[in-house]
Image (cartoon, grey):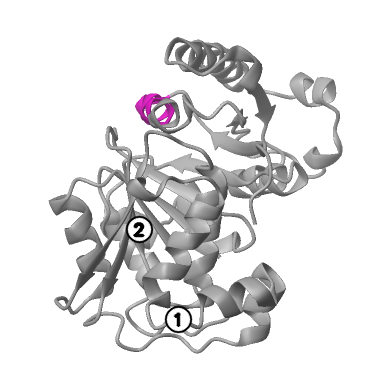
C-alpha cells in the first residue's frame, strides 16, 4: 500500500479571528515535520444582501457595487490573511508550502468553501468553530455545521480551542467507515515522527458493529490485503494498525485501548480524550442516508459536545 512521499493538500478556512490563531497553531503542531503537506488558506468576505446575479459578475464588477463597510471588511481580511501566513512561517511551515486567497461571497459561505474544496481536490478541509453556544448551533446553525451537513465526500476537520497535544484517538469497530477514517489518518500523517495514535474500542458502546460488505473493502484496499489483515481474530486492532504501518507510521507510535465501560458512545469517546489528553479524535461517519434517529448520530453528538479538541470526520 505504501509508495514514496505523497503530497497532502489541506484547505484551511479562516476569518482572521482568535479562532484563526488556534487553527494556525494546530496546523504547525501537526505539519511542521511533514514537508509534503501543502496548506491553502481561504477567507470568504460576506457580501450582505447581494443582488440577484452576483455569482455571474467579475471581481472588478462586484467591487463596484460593494458598500463602504464591505470594502473595509475586505481590506481587513486581506491584512489578516497576510498575518496568518506570517504566523505559519514563523511556526515552522515553509513559505513555499503555503498559498492563500481572499474571495468575495457569491453564494452561501458554506457552499463557497465546499466548492473550493471539491474543485481543488483537497485531502481535507479544516474549519474552526466560531465560539457560539451549543444551543445556538443547534437552533440557528453555523458555517461549520452547514459544511458538516453537506460534505460527506470530503474529510472535515473541526477545530475547537487551542490544542497542544499531538496525540490522536481513533475509535474502531471493524466497520468500513471506521477503516476509511484510519486510511485518511494514515495518508495525512505518513512518515510523521511526532504524532502518537491510540486505536480505541469499547465493547459496551460498540456491541453492534454496523453491517459491512466484502466488495466495499475489496474495492478500496484490494482483495489480497483484506484477506490477509481483515480475516484474523485480532483484526479489530490489527487491520487499522497495519494500515498505519503501511504508510510509514512506526509501530512504537501506535497503541490500542480496549475497555468494557460506557453507554453513550460520544460521551465515552470524549471522556477518554479528556482523561488521556488527546488533541484530535478521528472518526468515520455513517452514510448521510442512514437514519440517525431521535438522538442524532454519534458524530453529530460528538461535535456538539466537544471542547478544546479537533475532530476529523471522514465519510
Q: Nearer the viewer, residue 193 or 76?
A: 193
In the image, taking residue 137 as reference, residue 77 lies left or right, namely right
Depth order, front residue of 48/17: 17
Vertical side of 20 occupied by 240: above or below: below
Residue visible at 74% across and 40% down in the picture = 51
Which x, y percent locates residue 25?
A: 38, 26
- The range drawn in magenta is 17-25
The secondary element bearing badge 2 is classed as helix
| Residue 176 image point, x, y percent | 53, 75
- Return the mark for residue 303: 2
Q: Is residue 178 left or right of residue 12?
A: left
Mark sitting on residue 232: 1
Q: How many marks?
A: 2
Residue 174, position in %: x, y?
Answer: 44, 77
Residue 257 lies in what quarter of the image? bottom left
Q: Position of residue 260 (x, y in %)?
A: 16, 78
> For the N terminus, which image quadrant?
bottom right
Q: Is residue 297 left or right of residue 248?
A: left
- The answer to whether any part of residue 48 appears in the image is yes
In the picture, measured across the screen, residue 263 lies left or right of residue 291, that is left
Which circle, 2 or 1, is nearer the viewer?
Answer: 1
Amino acid at each position: 500500500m505504501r509508495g514514496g512521499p505523497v503530497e497532502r493538500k489541506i484547505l484551511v478556512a479562516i476569518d482572521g479571528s482568535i479562532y484563526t490563531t488556534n487553527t494556525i497553531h494546530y496546523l504547525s503542531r501537526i505539519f511542521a515535520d511533514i514537508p509534503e503537506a501543502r496548506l491553502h488558506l481561504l477567507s470568504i468576505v460576506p457580501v450582505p444582501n447581494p443582488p440577484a446575479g452576483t455569482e455571474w459578475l467579475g471581481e472588478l464588477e462586484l467591487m463596484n457595487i460593494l458598500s463602504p463597510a464591505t470594502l473595509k471588511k475586505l481590506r481587513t481580511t486581506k491584512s489578516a490573511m497576510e498575518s496568518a501566513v506570517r504566523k505559519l512561517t514563523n511556526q515552522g511551515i515553509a513559505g513555499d508550502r503555503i498559498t492563500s486567497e481572499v474571495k468575495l461571497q457569491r453564494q452561501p459561505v458554506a457552499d463557497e468553501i465546499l466548492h473550493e474544496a471539491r474543485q481543488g481536490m483537497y485531502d481535507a478541509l479544516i474549519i474552526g468553530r466560531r465560539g457560539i453556544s451549543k444551543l445556538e448551533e443547534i437552533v440557528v446553525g453555523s458555517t461549520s455545521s452547514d459544511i458538516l451537513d453537506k460534505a460527506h465526500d470530503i474529510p472535515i476537520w473541526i477545530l475547537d480551542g487551542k490544542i497542544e497535544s499531538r496525540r490522536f484517538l481513533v475509535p474502531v469497530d471493524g466497520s468500513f467507515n471506521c477503516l476509511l477514517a484510519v486510511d485518511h489518518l494514515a495518508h495525512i500523517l505518513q512518515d510523521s515522527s511526532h504524532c502518537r495514535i491510540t486505536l480505541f474500542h469499547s465493547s459496551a458502546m460498540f456491541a453492534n458493529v454496523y453491517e459491512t460488505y466484502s466488495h466495499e473493502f475489496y474495492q478500496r484496499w484490494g482483495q489480497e490485503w483484506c484477506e490477509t489483515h481483515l480475516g484474523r481474530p485480532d483484526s479489530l486492532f490489527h487491520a487499522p494498525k497495519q494500515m498505519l504501518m503501511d504508510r510509514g507510521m512506526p509501530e512504537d507510535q501506535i497503541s490500542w485501548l480496549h475497555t468494557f465501560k460506557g453507554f453513550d458512545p460520544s460521551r465515552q469517546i470524549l471522556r477518554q480524550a479528556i482523561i488521556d489528553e488527546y488533541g484530535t479524535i478521528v472518526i468515520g461517519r455513517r452514510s448521510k442516508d442512514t437514519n440517525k434517529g431521535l438522538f442524532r448520530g454519534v458524530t453529530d453528538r460528538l461535535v456538539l459536545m466537544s471542547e478544546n479538541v479537533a475532530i476529523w470526520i471522514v465519510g
